[in-house]
Image (cartoon, rainbow, N blue to C red):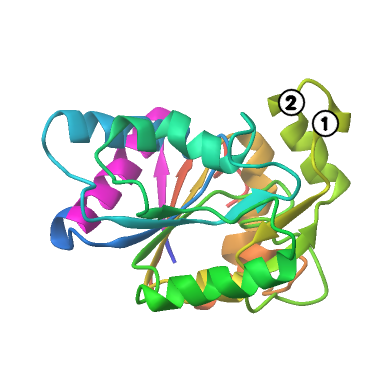
Amino acid sequence: MNVMIYKDKETASKAAATIIAAQILQKPNSVLGLATGGSPVLTYQNLVKLYEEGVISFADVISFNLDEYIGLDHEHNQSYFAFMQQNLFNFVDIPDGQYFVPSGVSEDPELECVEYEEKIEAYGGIDLQVLGLGGNGHIGFNEPANHFAPTTHVVDLTEETIEANSRFFTSKEEVPTKAISMGTGSIMKARKILLLAFGKGKAEAVANMVNGRISPQCQASLLQVHPDVTVLIDEEAAANL
């Protein structure tokens, strides 16, 4: 696990965009795993800038998102599909049909999970997976549990996660209570992983991820045994290391 500490999230996000851009330049048809939430927003803005400057193209890129709320269709402004459009896809040249987000309104969510996992495998697996980090150590929507989920699955969101995500909704009551998420096992299959964590609220989770015992109570701790993980954090998130 290569941990890189930056003065602030702005500097770290530029570094993250450079790493992703390098992946695309090295392999234009890279399969990217993408994350939502507050952590990657500045990284996506920097990627848009690199695209606008002609440094990179997304024309051959394939992307798979980590997760989606159950109960929100892709047109809902708080769906993760909409998030990706608002923060990246609408501003680069990735064609329709080359980016995938689980359906939150599938009639059979369990089947949606199986088919999503199969689609990732059909594209040869993920070359570079971008992750954020929850305050409780979750990655994707893999919450603290008594096991590591091996594949894409339906999850019940914890009260802590619902509370954290309520800032994106009009009220806490509007936040969905379930989601579809790649499993921790799915994430571990990625050839490279890039994790972003910023702010003092992430300091404990970062310390548990990097130096703690590997435990499903901190799902990100499993990343300790992945062969190629880069962690980009700011000074506040590094406070407990």
Q: Amino acid at mark 2?
A: Phe
Q: Tell me whether circle 1 and circle 2 mark residues in contact (CB < 8 Å).
A: yes
User: For this rendering, which residue is in front, 227 or 126?
Assistant: 126
Magenta highlight range: 3-24
User: For this rendering, which residue is in front, 179 or 166?
Assistant: 179
Q: Circle 1 sits on which residue? A: 174
User: For this rendering, which residue is in front, 11 or 123?
Assistant: 123
Answer yes or no: is residue 179 visible. yes
The extreme left residue here reads: 54
User: For this rendering, which residue is in front, 32 or 164?
Assistant: 32
Q: CA distance from mark 1 to mark 2?
A: 6 Å
Answer yes or no: is residue 7 visible. no
Quadrant assignment, res 190:
bottom left
Q: Residue 140 at what x, y percent from top left?
A: 62, 56
Q: Residue 31 at what x, y percent from top left?
A: 33, 63
**Most frequent secondary structure within the magenta stretch:** helix
Quadrant assignment, res 191:
bottom left
Q: Residue at x 57, y 72 (%)?
A: 115
Q: Amino acid at mark 1?
A: Glu
Relative side of 54 to 191, left or right: left
Q: Circle 2 sits on which residue? A: 169
Relative side of 30 to 110, left or right: left
**Circle number at residue 98:** none
Image quarter where the N terminus lies is bottom left
The extreme front residue here reads: 107
Relative to 234, residue 111 above or below: below
Q: Residue at x 83, y 47 (%)?
A: 177
Q: Residue 112 at what x, y percent from top left?
A: 64, 66
Relative to 142, residue 149 above or below: below
Q: Helix, strand or loop at disc 1?
A: helix
Q: Residue at x 69, y 75 (%)?
A: 149
